[in-house]
Each structure stands twice: as C-alpha cells, then as structure tokens.
Image (cartoon, rainbow, N blue to C red):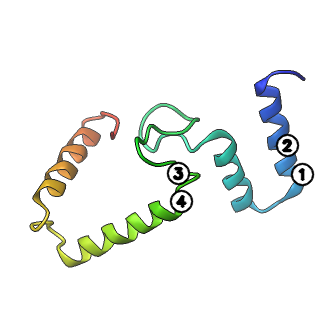
Amino acid sequence: MPGSKATEAMQRMKVLEQSQDGFFIAEMDMRLRGPGQVLGTRQSGLPDFALASLVEDQEVLELAREVAQMVIDSDESLNQWPVVRDELERRYQRMMSGSILT
C-alpha cells in the first residue's frame, strides 16, 4: 500500500494493536494526525500556532496555562493587564460572532 495515507493508516492500526488504553491511543492519534482546531471547520492537522506545537511544546504550554491561571486568580478582572484584557475581549467577540479564534 504505497502512499502517505496508507502509511498513516498502518501506523494507526499498529497503535490499536499495541494498546487498549484510550488515553494512549488519543495521544498517538494527536501525534500522527495533529490536534485539529478547537473552533473552526478543519478536523485534522496541526493548528496554526506561530510559536508553539501542541505535541512538541506540551510542557511549556502547561506552564503558560499555570501562569495564566495565577494571573487570573490574582486579578480576575485583569485591571492590571489592560492590553491582555482588551485582546481577550476582542477574541471573545470574534468567537461569539462565529469567526475562528486566532
């Protein structure tokens, strides 16, 4: 079965042969196909992050999430961070209007 689609299919089948652990299968699927988009119509492939990869940069993304949570815990209204607050508001409005979050 030549071709990249056949190769990917074989890799997925090998993962299913190796494990019945749903978390392992999901992680391997994300590595093979990419996580897709959280919001939007594209179902496979890596999202268009300019500076990070969900697969390769998992540790730094988790650290960023922890820091973001600490900022919110210390200043829920983000009054000390007006640029961040305004950008989040802009993105929220785009998301609620049906635009893809970017």
Q: Residue tagged by mark 3?
A: 54
Sequence-first disc among 4 and 1: 1
Q: Quadrant of residue 35?
A: top right
User: Residue 13 got which mark?
Assistant: 2
With respect to residue 84, does 96 lie above or below? above
Q: Which numbered disc, 2 or 3, marks the residue closer to the eye?
A: 3
Q: Residue tagged by mark 1?
A: 17
Q: Residue tagged by mark 4?
A: 58
The C terminus sits in image quarter: top left
Name the one closer to the observer, 34 or 92.
34
- Tag 2–tag 1 contact (CB < 8 Å): yes
- Alpha carbon distance from label 3 to label 4: 6 Å
In the picture, measured across the screen, residue 61 lies left or right of residue 19, that is left
- Alpha carbon distance from label 4 to label 1: 26 Å
- Mark 3 Cα-neighbour bin, 10 Å: few <14, some 14–19, many ≥20: some
Q: Quadrant of residue 63?
A: bottom left
Name the one closer to the observer, 7 or 39.
7
- Alpha carbon distance from label 2 to label 4: 25 Å
- What amino acid does circle 4 point to? Gln
